[in-house]
Amino acid sequence: MEGFALQHQHGKAKVRVGRLWRGATSQEHRFVEWNVSVSITSFVLPAFTDGDNSKIVATDSIKNTIYYLAKQCTEELSLEDFGVVVGQHFLRTYPKIVTGAKVILSQKPWERVVVDGVEHNHGFKLGSGKHTAEVIIGSNGCVKVTSGITDLSLLKTTQSGFEKFVRDQFTILPDTDERMLASTITGVWSYSGKPANYQRSWEAVKKVLMDTFFGSPPTGVYSPSVQHTLYQMAKAVLVRFPEIENIHLNMPNIHFLPVNLPTVGVKFENDVFLPTDEPHGSIEAKLSRMEIFQCKL
Ligand SMILES: O=c1[nH]c(=O)c2[nH]c(=O)[nH]c2[nH]1
């Protein structure tokens, strides 16, 4: 091809879908709001090189297919399972054209409202922490699923410090064993095997992440750094869920700056803060299971 190599894909990005399941017998409505992006790899090189569109599945058709498949899913299903349905559709419908599909999804955190301790049949409010997923399907039908969470904003007002770090001529920050700890967490984890229920699994992972960040309600748990807390959170997930093979956590350290007003005699006593968004500490890590190599003697 004219001495060049071209890698290409096409699809539709950010297709917004609301899906309501009304329940045949109960009054209880189930509702999700999804954002779906599909990207397919296919034999459409002539479209790029020669203007021959004859093998292009139109991105408009891809968008319409997403709505069609949402309609076909008459039973409630998880974000991940819908991603698999969408990806497999294109490979199965066009086996001679489509060689792979990548589906990136997110779910708005609508959650059922509870009124006076009773779950509402059809009332929802926005919660925190957005469920994300990515499904990659190869030409051999092999499916790779990752799940994730974004915008999980957590804050604790004590049981956090940062001490004994490198000191040089640029160091102003004092050691402290008493500070706020706040982060807006993004996490992505991959499954080696399919969990019984992706949505239940996602909720359980979110709970483990939060419980580990905060520690027990009365006393909490001391965090000597964001790094250490991140590691504890990631480790707790891998220990608790054998079907998860790795987890990547991004935990910006969102600073609450001490307010001192010396001219009027106001001294910071961990009471009045200046909340900030930027700049923030940028701390991320991926924890994976070690592969165990067995020697044959
Ligand atoms: O938990 C922290 N980790 C750091 O690496 C760091 N750096 C910094 O200035 N404050 C903090 N806090």
Image (cartoon, rainbow, N blue to C red):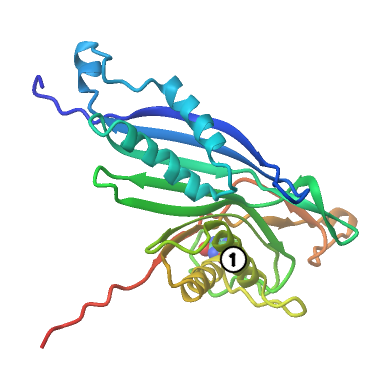
Q: Residue at x 26, y 15 (%)?
A: 54
Q: Is residue 109 above or below residue 2?
A: below
Element at label 1: helix
* Quadrant housing residue 207: bottom right
User: Looking at the figure, which quarter contains the C terminus?
Assistant: bottom left
Q: Is residue 147 left or right of residue 207?
A: left
Instruction: Report the image quarter containing ligand 1.
Output: bottom right
Q: Is residue 147 above or below residue 31?
A: below
Task: Name the spot of residue 165 as percent of width and height, x first.
Answer: 51, 71
Mark 1, residues whose alpha carbon is within 10 Å: few (<14), some, or many (≥20)?
A: some
Q: Is mark 1 within 8 Å of ligand 1?
A: no
From the image, tell me which residue sits under label 1: 204
Q: Is residue 98 left or right of residue 127?
A: left
User: Looking at the figure, which quarter contains the N terminus?
Assistant: top left
- Amino acid of disc 1: Ala
* Quadrant housing residue 9: top left
